[in-house]
Amino acid sequence: MALQRKKRDHPNGKADFNELEDDAYESVGFHDYGDYFERKKRKLQNQNAALYRDTEESSTSNIFKGLSMAINGYTNPSYSELRTMIIQNGGTFVQYVDKKTSLSFLICSFLTPSKANQWKHHKVVTPQWIVDCINKKKLLPWTNYRAIQPVASQSLLSFPETYRERDSQLSKQHHESLKVDSQVEDALPSYNEEQTEMKERSENLPDSLKSLSNSARHNYLLLKNPNIRKSTTQNPEFLQKFFNSSRLHHLSTWKTALKEEIQIMTASTGLTSSRNLKSINEKHFIMHVDFDCFFAAVSTRNTGDLQLKPVAVAHGIKNSEIASCNYEARKYGIKNGMFVSTAKSLCPSLVLVDYDFDAYEAVSREFYSVLVDTPNDYLKVISIDEALLDLTNHVQCFEDCVNIAESIRTRVRMKTNCDVSVGIGSNVLLARLALRKAKPHNVFYIKDEDASVYMQSLPVQDLPGVGPSQSSKLFELFNVKFVGDLQRLNKNVLQKSFGTNYGLHLYNISRGIDTDVITNETPRRSISVDVNWGVRFVFLEDAMDFLKRLLQELLNRMSKCDVSLHQLQLRVLKRPENVSFDPVKYLGAGEVTPLTRSIMFTSATKSFDILYKRLTNLFISLDVDPGDVRGIGLQASKIVKDTKNEKLFNFNAPIKTPQKKIVSGQFGSPNRLHSQAQEFDKSNEDNDPSLARDTFIPSTPYDLPSSSQISPGVLAQLPQSMQGSIKRQLDVQNKRIDEIPSQLDPLFLKELPTPIRNEVKEDHEITINKRLKLKSHALPNVKVPEDTVKKIQQQDAFERMLRPNKKEKKQYLPQVDLQVLEELPKEIQESVLEENRLSRYDLAREVKMKPNPVISFQQKQSIDDLRELLAKWYQKSPRGPNSHDVDYFSRYLGRVIREERNLLKAQALVRWLQQLNRKDKTAAWQTAIEKTIEAVQEACLVRNTPPLVLL
Ligand SMILES: Nc1ccn([C@H]2C[C@H](O)[C@@H](COP(=O)(O)OP(=O)(O)OP(=O)(O)O)O2)c(=O)n1
Ligand SMILES: [Mg+2]
Ligand SMILES: [Mg+2]
């Protein structure tokens, strides 16, 4: 029997059915459970409709107009009294509530803990609120009548002055959605709608706040909720909480700490300089070891039954990201980085477990102790769960590597009850590709002779340094999709299109040739603190206050390492203009434009006052609306040691120490690492008190070339602090300067590690420029004594080295694309920057100047125009779209995500298609929509952002 429903604008509960024809009154029979509830709901709605009819005349006020309410459990006044009170005062009474019902308020006196948990994201008030509102004849702030005490994660907005607008909107949306017709409502508020809503809501703002920008007002209203405020930068304890629970923070801290420890161990075993025994051309054996689903495995390692179930580690909130999921969960299509809500829709039985940072750290230490016990040439920390080993001098063939790999796997399993996988190859690239193949729970190796063939079928994006821009350029120019296609391209052609360095890189890696060698860990060159979640400011003062706390945190970290800084960088993540105020991720940064600025200090400092003053000016100079700030970071670079007793590392120690191999068991316990290191430092200091006295930390620990290659001329051109350091090191190494060439010695330069060489070269260039400048400006008759000129040159050179040379760099600005650059491997990034004589700072400004392009589809760009287009497309193809059109549109969505970088737009368009097909549910359209969703999620993956919620 067809359900006849008159379309009326009645709110929920007022639906006017023809009772006689409504099958809600038929017996339930053998219908399914869902059907039973559907019927029950309609039955109750009909009863309410009758009640509304009766009370229409007798209604006393409209104070609850636009609000929908339900009652739960025992109440005083009674259920029926309350119901009448609600209806008589214009409210909508909802008799039956399920998950889909949008409700303004739930009225109840008491909730059991489980119910309280279930309703924690709703407004739950006591019956007294109804009574008092009616007595006072106005809506009173509901927060004074809460039946559930707020919880920290509550994400519901509650603004005493404005909730009515919001609720009536919610309730309107809900009723619109109840209508079974072709009217399609917008799934997400568009940016314009958000702006309009903001304007309406802002009318309730105090006068003093009316001058605020829209984004600041938005934050003001958002932060009115104490629960939300508690989770943001407005909370004085925010930083501590943030760092305690931020997995990314933990990951980076662990990595730094592990690197330092491994560095100490390798230094103490004397493996540093003598280990590069084989040249790059000789065959190497590289091993890449990585835990399988690290966080998830650690969290379930002692729970046999959980290991067999799909498990993910996340904070548990709907829009939180999955940090790690086990391979059982991956069978359902769940991936690391996915939102919990998406994952749950793929696998409702997914078990969520919380983070256990202490356990991850402990397991990682066991892991590294096994690796340190494995004879190796180099051990490089990649992350908490992952390392590279160079075994070249310890094995003869791949089979030896496999045996070692199996032994590592067994020992790690015994110590941690978790699995690692191992990839082996003759270089880092092949080891990495082999690891991918080995996962999970296995060992795999790729021989050189198989590499080329093995790689042919890989998409080019699987290659290191090939990101979306490069791969789409490769596709556009040469129709290249797979590595096999790339292998067919000539080296010259690649270099012409992609530049000398990157062209060569592409040519090499497509053949499995990787010149990246595993080198020693470099000492810490910078210390930073970054916060990219929960950053919400209203006023400039908020930003200043937070900067203060962040600077304090940076100084604390610096003080732990006993360093001062020469350079301080401020990094700000800014919401671009047409991006929503509220990112998809709750209080996250969302889509942002990064801005960076640095300040240089001629003398090293760690003074809060000096730094804070410059920092605030720097922030102001960025001219960012405080409401638009979504993330802030500080980085101390060009750091110098400021105490004589270096605790961890002796940067000026002679690198060559007696050969001492790691023997099995030596580093069995992680705590021994520290004590071992300290002993090592101590013994060195005992032997030679002149060590560890200098303050400058070079970018890389360096061994000096033979004395004949160091000229006093060169030395004189170095920054003074470096001169001191080199002279002392020469003393230590018993080297003398016995030649006096007058200019930069190429041999000497060649021997220096690249970063130092660059510094020296830059410095030299500046000195030369300065000299030229001095010449041209010198008054013809004034003779400056030569000594003085030299001194000025040296001093100036050092100062200028610490200052960015704006004029010089400006003219090179437009040649490098930051997005392209970021996808390249670090080394290539540096060389591109060097080639273009640019710093990242310049590029960030460049990005700021050039907004993302808005991509057109059939000459349409705005969401509204595109929706119109899609609606026409849908109407014209009732039996489903042409597959080429679907591909075409999917590709467009991909570009919206990758190039226009507008996630919300892509989301809104797909949802629109879903809405269009909601009524008829045409299967062909459904398939087409799924295809577009796939394209969208793939583009998100490429961009490294979590998938959009589209189910
Ligand atoms: N963006 C990231 C990257 C990593 N991790 C954490 C969770 C991971 O468990 C751990 C290791 O990262 P991997 O990339 O090695 O991922 P898994 O070990 O989880 O999975 P796989 O088996 O693919 O290595 O680091 C994280 O929280 N967020
Ligand atoms: Mg892993
Ligand atoms: Mg890893």
Image (cartoon, rainbow, N blue to C red):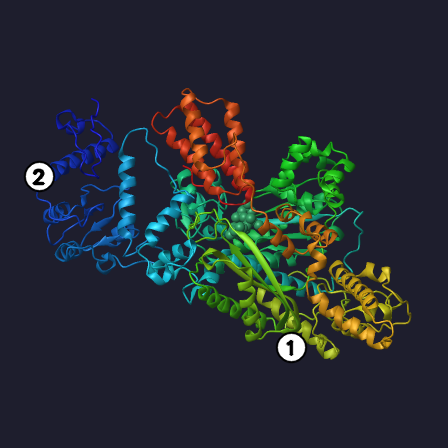
> Callout 2: few (<14), some (14-19), or many (20+) C-alpha neighbours within 10 Å?
few
Which residue carries the number 2 mark? 54
Q: Position of residue 380 (x, y in %)?
A: 66, 56
Q: Is residue 671 left or right of residue 927?
A: right
Which residue carries the number 1 mark? 643
| Mark found first going from the N terminus, 1 or 2 | 2
> On screen, 327 above or below 252?
above
> On screen, 914 above or below 465?
above
Q: Is residue 471 left or right of residue 147?
A: right
What residue do we see at 34% from left, 61% from top? 207
SS label for mark 2 = helix
Q: Position of residue 309 (x, y in %)?
A: 43, 43
What residue do we see at 77% from left, 37% from top? 491
Q: Quadrant of the N terminus?
A: top left
Q: Quadrant of residue 209?
A: bottom left
Specify the amino acid type for callout 2: Asp
Specify the amino acid type for callout 1: Thr
Q: Position of residue 258 (x, y in %)?
A: 60, 61
